[in-house]
Amino acid sequence: MNGTKSSAVHGPQATSGLRILTLRVNGSVYRCAAAPQALLLDILREEFRLVGTKRGCDMGTCGCCNVLIDGKAVPSCLVLAFDCEDKEIQTVEGLSLEEDGHLHPLQEAWAHSGGSQCGFCTPGFLMTSKELLACNPNPSREEIERALSGNVCRCTGYQKIVDAVSLAAKNMREWKEGGKQ
Amino acid sequence: MSHPHEIPNQDHGLIGKRIPLIDAFRKAAGQAIYTDDIQLPGQLVGKILRSPHPHAKILSIDTSRAESIPGVHAVVTGKEATNHFGVLPVSQDETALAVDKVLFIGDNVAAVAAESEEIALKALGAIQVEYEPLQAFLKMEDSLEQVPEELRLHPKTVDGTNIHKQVEQEFGDFDEAYEKALWKKRQTFRFIGVTHAFTEPMCTIAHFDADERLTLWSATQVPHYLHRALAKVMEMPMHKIRVIRPTVGGGFGGKSDPFPHEMVAALLSRKCRRPVKILFDREEVFYSNHGRHPSKIEVALAIDANKKISGLHVDALIDGGAWGSFGVVTTYYNGVLANGPYRLPNFRYRGRRVYSNKPPCGAMRGHGAVNTRYAYEILLDEAAHDLGIDPAAFRRDNVLPPNTKTINELRITTSGIGECIDRAVEASGWKEKYGKLPFGHGIGIAGGFYISGSALPIHWDKIPQSTVHLKVDLDGGVTIHSLAAEIGQGSDTMLAQIVADVLGLPIHFCRVFSEDTDTAPIDLGSYSSRVTFMAGNAARKAAENLRHLLIQAAADLTGYPAEVFVLRNERVVNCTMPEIQVPYLEAVRRAMKDCGALQTSGCYQAPPMGGKFKGAAAGLSPTYSFQAFVVELSVDLQTGKPKLHDVWAAHDCGKALNPLAVEGQIEGSIHMGLGQVLCEEFAYNKGNVLNPNFLDYRTLSPMEMPRVHPILVETCDPEGPFGAKECGEGPLLPILPAVSNALFDAIGVRFYELPITADRIWRALKRKKKEEAKSLV
């Protein structure tokens, strides 16, 4: 209790020791002044206002803040923002950019399968699932369950989340084979 | 009037349709706005100083150093707002911040609002509090003793003890039934506490603005109760307070109390006149708990010569922690809700809830019914086993019939318990498996029932429990105003489906505004599984009133009598001459002619019911859900680790308004119930929470979940909206005992203490082996 949650520095008095941080997120360049110890989650949410990425536990145990860093799903609450300066970051807001503004097949499948109830864990699950499907376009239910084991959902019992990933994988394979739409 | 043409032969009806929740795409896009996603201009960071002692007098608080830190804009202590609040009018024992005494480690002592979290934390460190520690009450039994006044946690307790609430009830003659029983057993069960573990931490933003109005954004299940509590604590009229509920990241009962941090944010904001946000870290979420009560429950069961249940005695001692919360209700529910789904002619109950110096316990999914249900269903299984009866058939033979009254005067209308048992047995292949699987592999069954909303509201002011307003303007969109809190369970979708169905419209015509006390009529909120039944009925009535206006408009336009018109496929159609029809938008315009935008409302209030005895209101509901689950599992005999294979979950939901959503509720309930039976423990040491994080408080991962087969049983309740009843809590009840009964079938051991972890199973197997070896000698 009463531990520091946000390492982002706000307010007029907090100016010493700041450096300019440059990050590439969802294909765009973002800049801000930040303390060296600033965590990626704080920068994404508090500085860049990319609030689709959720803060659930601040210790890498729930997966709500997972983002892709060079294609790998990582809890952004455990990553120093300055360590990401030469990397490609993708958040939930970036998923639809690959689809000309339409929802990503994972997002479509999530909605149709009932993968979200409260929805708070959804962005993190989507990013983990995206990494999975990039490595394994045709995962079994067991492989999906294993890949998603670092993400916590308290609403769905996971069954419809696994359904969603299976459906998205199927749709993505079919579209790839058939030349996308 | 439009061109007469054929009505398309398609059914736009939405009831029973498997459709995505109306917010599913927004949530999948990451566009849903939760409280912490809101950032107001000039917003400050609020932080709460918490007690390091489980029980202590506050001798003094010196905030002067904290106040002088640059960037600190407000500091508050308990003396500044001493009005008590609490979710139940009968036990208002909380204050915004501790006034004279702290009651648990993590109790709220003082708070600051500052320009950054760093400054706020520095200010908390600069507040000096002098405590005088008192004897801490950490074991339930200690709270039963009479103690001097200064050791009582609250002024109102039972006979000078730390017992918060004691209830005793008897119906029929339990002693006689027990005396004459063919089979009987008395057994004590122990349950450790568990907590909701929703993913979104508590968060609230208060803004006391220049108009001297207070707006509070908060992750809450009960905006109306929060509204009332704020008025009381802030000493402001309700009309100057606005509560907004942004998207809520899970509740399960854990966000169904008005909370001190919500009062604190409001106090800080009033002091500095700037918006103040308080966001909990995960540890603070655990320390505010409000989860399921740790319980010690003694149950005695009697079965008569006809192999019918003849008597049940429940004696429940439950640990409430520091505050009342929903505890008076919990105390009753631990007994009252054992009166189904089986016929019970003799029932005796004693329930005692004690205060202790631990974070408060409150309402959690399956509120009050879960632990007693476990105990009851284990003893039923033992009885069946000892009497040589199939436990599924034994339960089937004892079910409550529909349209009856239980001995404690719960009014049962529809009941699908028989069908639930039959279908779970059928789908699982029970008859081929029960008692026939190899050692280490087992199958078990259990039943349950649960309220669909409490028939008597907790505030006795005779206003409807749910009201829904509809507004239609020139664009034809139907705006639905309600205060039923969407917390992920799909209540917004339920409202939209009902309204669109009644009006014969596609669902996209409906837009639901269910987050704002300024615009919504009162609804008591999302707890006690009340929303589908109560808000759903209110929405249906409001939509029927709107339908009446549109039909009248069509009658005026066409010259045919109103009685012949129906609404379907975006048209008002003369059903005797289908070529006569008026498009929906034309009917809307005509109906608006003399009044502008159309407005209707509908409300729901439960009919009078129940007995005249003390506590008769507890457990009364306009209808009940029923369920029977079968679980198949195996045990690794080397390690004791259980592996769950399948759950066949038959649930009587009245009518599945949206099967996708109902299945989601069943599957989620099973996940939470499996956690309590297999691994979750809210563990304490000397008043400290030992595992206040997701690493140490372990919920089941996707890999540990069984395959769940939801079986939707539809009994079409005559009072439910389109026949619907609840589906969000009842399905949690049977999973715990069904797992335990399957373990008995697998390894021949009964478990009387939860959770049933692998090491407990391993120890039990070892003990069993030893005993068997001994009996061979």
Image: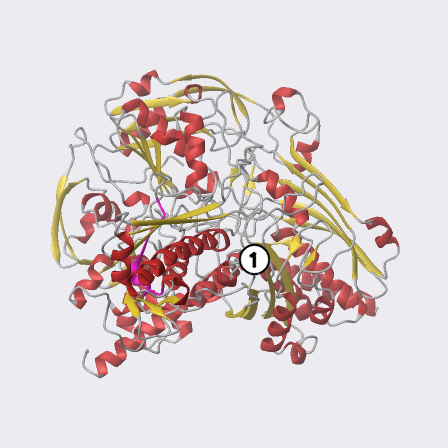
Residue that badge 1 annotates: B730
Give me the chain letter of mark 1.
B
Q: Is residue B542 left or right of residue B44?
A: right
Q: Is B107 situated left or right of B340 in this image? A: left
Image spot of residue A125 (x, y percent):
33, 61
Task: Residue B48: tell me if it is visible.
Answer: no
Vertical side of B767 occupied by A170: above or below: below
Tag 1, which secondary structure?
helix
* Residue at image point 27% right, 77% down: B5
At a point 82% along the width and 67% down the height, the residue shown is: B775
Residue B231, horizontal then vertical, whole percent: 42, 29
User: Which quadrant: the C terminus of chain B?
Assistant: bottom right
The image quadrant of residue B244 is top left
Along the viewing direction, whichever of B715 and B181 lies nearer the viewer: B715
Could you tell me which residue is drawn at 16 percent across and 30 percent down? A12
Q: Is residue B121 left or right of residue B298?
A: left
* Residue B685 in picture, x, y percent from top left: 56, 39
Q: Residue extending furthest front?
A: B559
- Where does the image place residue A34, in percent across and percent down from the top left? 17, 41
Image: B582 above or below B361: below
Q: Which residues are magenta?
A: B504-515
| Residue B155 image-quadrant placement | top right
Q: Nearer the viewer, residue A4 or B478?
A: B478
Task: Residue B754: tell me if it is visible.
Answer: yes
